[in-house]
């Protein structure tokens, strides 16, 4: 029997949607997902992770009083391909990433740099803290031996004490979505006048 109509495009769209669903389901397991803008705060003191509203490379990533109007306190997650629960933390307002600066003059002190999902210094393994809602540790994905840690003076450093409460951070959705394309995210492009998908 000869088929009357073979809709390969429909199959491709279905497969694409299925893959997007499965990938989003995987992110739901850890409680955070790409494409959402978050405020990240240190769980013990409530201070917010910020770039100080500075868009330059080498700007320090520090803690400051929370300010919902501050673009420097908004962060999104860019998934790292083929690495489960591993993300680049990007400020979408400046299109800059948190970088662990392993080889800088102050090694492991967080600073800001151009987004590069292939750079190990920008890959964070996000791990939920057991028994604490929306609370996570941000580990050095390359080996998991260091985690983002709040310092007394308000700086952030990758330290090796994985049991310290200063390594616990909360992710709170801002209600905003990323409005610019970011690396390693998948998009559906629709023609505005016709509504047709490219």
Image (spheres, grey):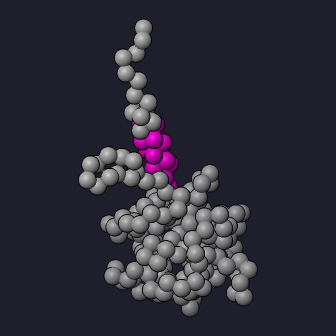
Q: Position of residue 72 (x, y in %)?
A: 44, 81
The relative height of residue 21 versus residue 35 in the rendered view (above or below) is above
Note whether 61 is above or below 76 in the view shown: below
**Relative to 96, is 36 on the left or the right?**
left
- Which image quarter: residue 137? bottom right
Q: Could you tell me residue 13's position as x and y percent?
A: 41, 38
Total tally of numbered discs in the picture: 0
| Residue 188, magenta (yes or no) | no
> Farthest residue toward the front?
193
Magenta extent: 14-30
Q: Is residue 89 above or below residue 106?
A: above
Q: Position of residue 87 (x, y in %)?
A: 56, 62
Estimate the x, y position of residue 156 in percent, counting from the top left. Answer: 58, 82
Residue toward you, 120 or 192:
192
Q: Residue at x 32, y 46 (%)?
A: 196
Name the residue: 41% across, 34% down: 9
Q: Is residue 80 visible?
A: yes
Q: What residue is drawn where x is 60% and y is 64%? A: 117
Quadrant (top left/top right/bottom left/bottom right) for the N terminus: top left
Task: Give the vertical position of 37 relative to 13 (above or below).
Answer: below
Most prominent secondary structure in the magenta stretch? helix
């Amino acid at each position: 029997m000869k088929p009357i109509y073979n809709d390969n495009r429909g199959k491709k769209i279905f497969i694409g949607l299925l893959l997007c669903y499965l990938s989003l389901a995987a992110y739901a397991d850890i409680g955070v997902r790409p494409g959402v803008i978050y405020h990240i705060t240190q769980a013990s003191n409530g201070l917010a992770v910020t770039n100080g509203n500075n868009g330059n490379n080498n700007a320090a990533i520090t803690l400051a009083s929370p300010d919902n109007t501050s673009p420097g306190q908004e962060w999104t997650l860019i998934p790292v391909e083929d690495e489960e629960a591993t993300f680049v933390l990007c400020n979408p307002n400046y299109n800059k990433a948190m970088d662990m600066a392993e080889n800088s003059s102050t090694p492991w002190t967080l600073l800001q740099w151009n987004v590069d999902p292939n750079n190990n210094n920008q890959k964070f393994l996000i791990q939920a803290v057991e028994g604490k809602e929306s609370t996570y540790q941000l580990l050095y994905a390359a080996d998991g031996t260091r985690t983002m840690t709040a310092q007394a003076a308000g700086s952030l450093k990758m330290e090796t004490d994985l049991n310290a409460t200063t390594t616990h951070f909360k992710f709170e959705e801002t209600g905003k979505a990323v409005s610019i394309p970011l690396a390693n995210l998948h998009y559906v492009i629709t023609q505005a006048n016709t509504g047709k998908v490219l």
